[in-house]
Image: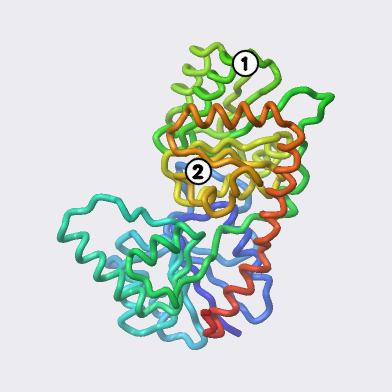
């Protein structure tokens, strides 16, 4: 029996699905240690810790001593460290590296352009190169993450692609627009924070499409809540789109799944987004994605004009053109949705299990 300790920042639904899948595997004893068991920004309520062992980090003088003892002195133990940008986890990772314990790093797309004072940037870069060298493997969620990690000095031989995994069966079966219905249903999913997710850009783009074409055959649902929700509703009203665009407020994962199954195209116009799971969930639901090039999962999964469209982040004109193209080519949109589902099927959770087992066995490449 191999003990697998997984340290993470929070418990989003896709991580819960991954952890349940790993816990069900023979020969793996999983313990999840979470920095924040509850996340005010994403107040999920339904059973996110069911099906696996999870506990919060317990700090004393900045260190979870029980976690350190389990990681360093227990036999047949490996640690996966995600969210390695908070002091307690930085210290924990450093101690594992000093003790040469078996550990793996996991990250979504790092922001290599983030500003840091020169001295801090130099010390951080040196620490990361040391940590990468001591890690058994360094996992990135997709190609953009792996490129960034390589730029940060991670040896190519340590790198593994390990994205977020969604329950493909749970999202299967979208409702594509039929000629009889005559309404194409666009959807966005995510926290309403315009500087990040860019929902206001989609509203502006749809406003332009409406003015340019006078088409009545679309609706747009924004599934989520957040600090800019009222500002977004005001923008919708100012463009005269109240009857066409709806902001739902916070939804639980099963409610998001229902909205996706009733939709035709995901719009994901984010301005900065490391690896949004909404893109993965939509493609699993058979929806093509109109996504920006600032979203890691868009760059990783969307092939332009095959299973979706990619536009330059913040380019409302390009976004509106892609929306209009979708409205004019319904049959093609249906085929692109099928292609999106096939893309999603390339990453079942069984693939995650295979990767983790290979790392546990020391077979990184």
Residue 120 relative to residue 46: left or right: left
Q: Image quadrant of residue 289? A: top right
Asked if labels 1 and 2 touch by Cβ distance under 8 angstroms, the answer is no
Query: What residue sits right under mark 2 in the picture?
Result: 42
- Residue 252 screen position, x and y as percent: 62, 41
Between disc 2 and disc 1, the foreground one is 1
Residue 171 rendering spot, x and y as whole percentages:
71, 48
Q: Is residue 195 above or below residue 22?
A: above
Locate residue 17 relative to residue 296 in the image: left or right.
Answer: right
Q: Nearer the viewer, residue 330 or 110?
A: 330
Tell which of 169 and 319 is nearer to you. 319
* Residue at the image point whose x is 44% and y is 79% from the top: 136
Tag 1: Cα neighbours inside 10 Å, few (<14), some, or many (≥20)? few
Q: What element does badge 1 sit on?
A: helix
Q: Sequence order check: which comes first, mark 2 or mark 1?
A: 2
What is the x, y in percent for residue 207?
54, 18
Q: Which mark is residue 73?
A: none
| Element type at mark 2 | loop
Residue on which disc 1 sits: 213
Residue sticking out furthest to the bottom:
75
Taking depth in this image into account, of 294 and 86 the one nearest to the observer is 294
The residue under the point 31% across, 74% down is 94
């Amino acid at each position: 029996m191999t003990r697998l300790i997984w340290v993470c920042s929070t418990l989003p639904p896709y991580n819960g699905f991954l952890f349940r899948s790993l816990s069900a595997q023979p020969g793996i004893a999983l313990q999840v240690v979470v920095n924040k068991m509850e996340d005010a920004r994403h107040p999920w309520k339904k059973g996110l810790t069911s099906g696996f062992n999870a506990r919060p980090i317990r700090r004393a003088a900045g260190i979870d001593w029980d976690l350190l003892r389990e990681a360093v002195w227990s036999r047949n133990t490996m640690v996966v460290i995600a969210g390695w940008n908070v002091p307690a986890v930085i210290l924990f990772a450093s101690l594992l590296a000093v003790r040469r314990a078996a550990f793996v790093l996991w990250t979504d797309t790092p922001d290599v352009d983030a500003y840091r004072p020169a001295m801090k940037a130099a010390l951080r870069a040196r620490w990361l190169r040391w940590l990468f060298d001591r890690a058994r493997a360094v996992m990135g969620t997709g190609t953009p993450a792996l490129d960034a990690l390589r730029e940060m000095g991670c040896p190519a031989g340590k790198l593994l692609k390990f994205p977020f995994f969604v329950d493909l069966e749970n999202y299967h079966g979208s409702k594509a627009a039929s000629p009889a219905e005559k309404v194409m249903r666009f959807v966005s999913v995510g926290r309403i924070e315009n500087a990040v997710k860019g929902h206001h850009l989609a509203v502006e783009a749809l406003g332009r499409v409406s003015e340019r074409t006078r088409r009545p055959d679309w609706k747009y649902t924004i599934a989520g809540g957040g600090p800019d929700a009222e500002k977004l509703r005001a923008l919708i009203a100012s463009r005269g789109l109240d009857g066409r665009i709806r902001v739902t407020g916070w939804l639980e994962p099963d409610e998001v799944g229902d909205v996706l199954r009733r939709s035709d195209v995901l719009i994901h116009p984010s301005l900065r987004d490391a690896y949004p799971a909404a893109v993965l969930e939509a493609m699993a639901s058979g929806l093509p994605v109109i996504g920006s090039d600032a979203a890691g999962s868009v760059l990783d999964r969307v092939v332009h004009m095959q299973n979706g469209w990619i536009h330059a982040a913040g380019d409302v004109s390009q976004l509106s053109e892609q929306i209009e193209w979708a409205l004019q080519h319904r049959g093609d949109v249906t085929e692109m949705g099928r292609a999106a589902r096939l893309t999603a099927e390339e990453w079942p959770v069984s693939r995650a299990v295979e990767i983790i087992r290979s790392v546990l066995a020391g077979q990184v490449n």
